[in-house]
Image (spheres, helix red, strand yellow):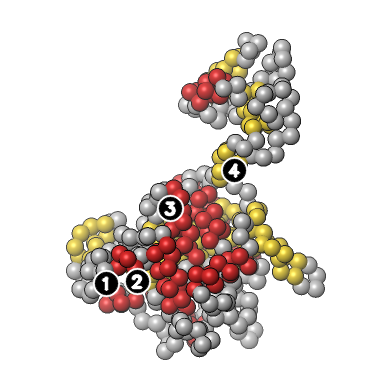
Amino acid sequence: MPLNFFWDDIPENLISPDFCEKGFSPEFSSEKSNNIVRLISPKKSSKNKQENIFFPPENHLLIKYENLQVLKWLAGAGEKNEGAEKSFYGAEKTCADSQLACDSAEKPCYGAVNFIYIDPPYNTRNDFAYNDNFTTQNDRHSAWLSFMSRRLKLARSLLREDGCIFIAIDQNELFVLKLLCDQIFGEENFVNDFMWLHGKGKKDTWSRTLQQHTLCYARDKTKLKPFKEIEQTSWAKSNVDNDPRGNWFSGSISFSEKRSNPKHKNFYSITSPSKKVWTRQWLVSKEEMQELIKEDKIYWGPSPEFSKVPREKIFNDTEKEIIPKNIFDCPESTRDAQNHLDKILGIKNAFENPKPVSLVKHFIKISMQPADALILDFFAGSGTTFEAVCELNKEDGGKRKCILVQKPEAFKNSELPFKTIADLCEARCLKVAEKFDVI
C-alpha cells in the first residue's frame, strides 16, 4: 500500500519571500539563455563562443535561475517551446537564436539524468547566506516539505529508470524527508542513509553528533546497478598455511548448495587437491576460478584433507570490490572543504559549510553509473559537484557531463566581490574548468 503522508501545502511565493526577489520567479524558457553559463576552461571559451547549447548538454552547464522553474523546464512541465529541430530522448530538440542558444522542446532532460546530488536547505533556522528558515508561527515543517516536495517530484521525472538521487540532510528534517521521499520515490526504492563522519562533530548539552546524513533513492531499484566500492585490504593478521606471500584472510566465493541456482551461468564444479568435488553457484566465472586456483588463491582447508568449503585467499594491499558501507570516514573534513574553497576563491568564508569534493566523488563512484553519465545538482551552492565530476573524469578518463542550477541569490554580505551565490559558483567552476582544461 502506498504511503500517505500529509502536511499543509504552502504556496511557493509564501514559503520564503527572499527566494524570489520580486515575487514569484517567471517560467524558465529559451529566452532566458543568458542565464546559462557553459563551464569550460577560459582558454577554450573563444573557440566555443558561437556554439549553441542543446539539452541534454554536450558541455558542463551552470544555470543561474530559480531551481523550481528550471526543473519544470527540464522535465517538460513548463511552457511549450517552438522551432523543433530533431528528435532526442523522445522529445524535439531545438535551438534558440541568442549567442548562448539553449533549448530543447517539451522535455529537454526528461528521463535522461543518471545521477542527482543535492544539498538543500536544512531548515535549521540559522542565518546563512541563503534562506534556511521555513518555520511559520505554528508549523515547523509544512513550508519546508512543500518546498522540497515540488522539487523532488520533478527531479524524479528527470531520472533515468536506472538512475539514483543522493540528498544531503541533517537531523532537523531527516525523518520527515525520509517519509516524503518514501511517498515520492516509493519505499521500495530506498537504497540507504549514507552517513559520513566529520571531524569532532556537532555537540549540544546532551550529545555530540558525529555523522551527517545522505539519503539515497533509486528511480527504480530493480533496474539500479548494485553499488560497489574499491577497497585496499590491510587487515589480514594471520597466515595459517605459511604462504610465502604473507598474511591473508579468506573471503566467501560461493553460495551454499541450498541457495545456489543450478541454471545460473556460474553454477559449476571444482575439485580440491584431495579430489573432493564442490558443485554450487560461485561468485566468479569458471575462467576466473581456474585463474584463482592456478595462482593458489583458493583455500581448501588444512592439508591433507582439503575438505573445507573453498574460499578466496585475500592478501594485504589487494584491491577488492566490496559492497559500500553506509557509515564511513570522509577523507576530508568540513574544515578541509572550507579551506579548499577559500583557497580557490582567494577569500575566506565567502560561502559557509561547503561539502567536501571527495564526498560527492565517493557517491558518484559507488553508484556505478556509466563514465558518460549526466549528473545534476539543482542546489549547486559553491559548485562542489562540478569539481567532483572534473576530478573523476580526469582520474578514469570519463566523459560525465554536469548540469548545475543555482539561483542568483544576493549575499547578505555586500563586501564580497560576488553579488550572488550563483556568481560565486560560476567563479569557482571556471577556475576548476581551467585547472582541468575542461572543454
Q: Which mark is residue 244?
A: none
Dot 2: element: strand
In contact (CB < 8 Å): disc 1 and disc 2:
yes
Q: Amino acid at mark 1?
A: Leu
Chain-order first, disc 4 or disc 1: 1
In contact (CB < 8 Å): disc 3 and disc 2:
no
Camera-side mark, 4 or 3: 3
Chain-order first, disc 4 or disc 3: 4
Q: Residues within 10 Å of mark 3 (few under 14, many from 20)?
A: few
Residue underneath mark 2: 37
Dot 4: element: strand
In contact (CB < 8 Å): disc 2 and disc 4:
no
In contact (CB < 8 Å): disc 4 and disc 1:
no
Chain-order first, disc 1 or disc 2: 2
Q: Amino acid at mark 4?
A: Glu
Q: Is residue 3 above or below residue 412?
A: above
Label 3, label 2: how far apart the Cα atoms are: 22 Å
Residue underneath mark 3: 394
In contact (CB < 8 Å): disc 3 and disc 1:
no
Q: Is residue 87 above or below residue 63?
A: above
Q: Residues within 10 Å of mark 1 (few under 14, many from 20)?
A: many
Residue 213, picture quadrant: bottom right
Dot 3: element: helix
Q: Nearer the viewer, residue 128 or 77?
A: 128
Residue at point 43% right, 58% down? 390
Label 4, label 3: how far apart the Cα atoms are: 20 Å
Residue underneath mark 1: 100
Q: Amino acid at mark 3?
A: Lys
Q: Is residue 417 left or right of residue 304?
A: left
Q: Which mark is residue 231?
A: 4
Position of the N terminus, as image quadrant, is bottom right
Dot 1: element: loop
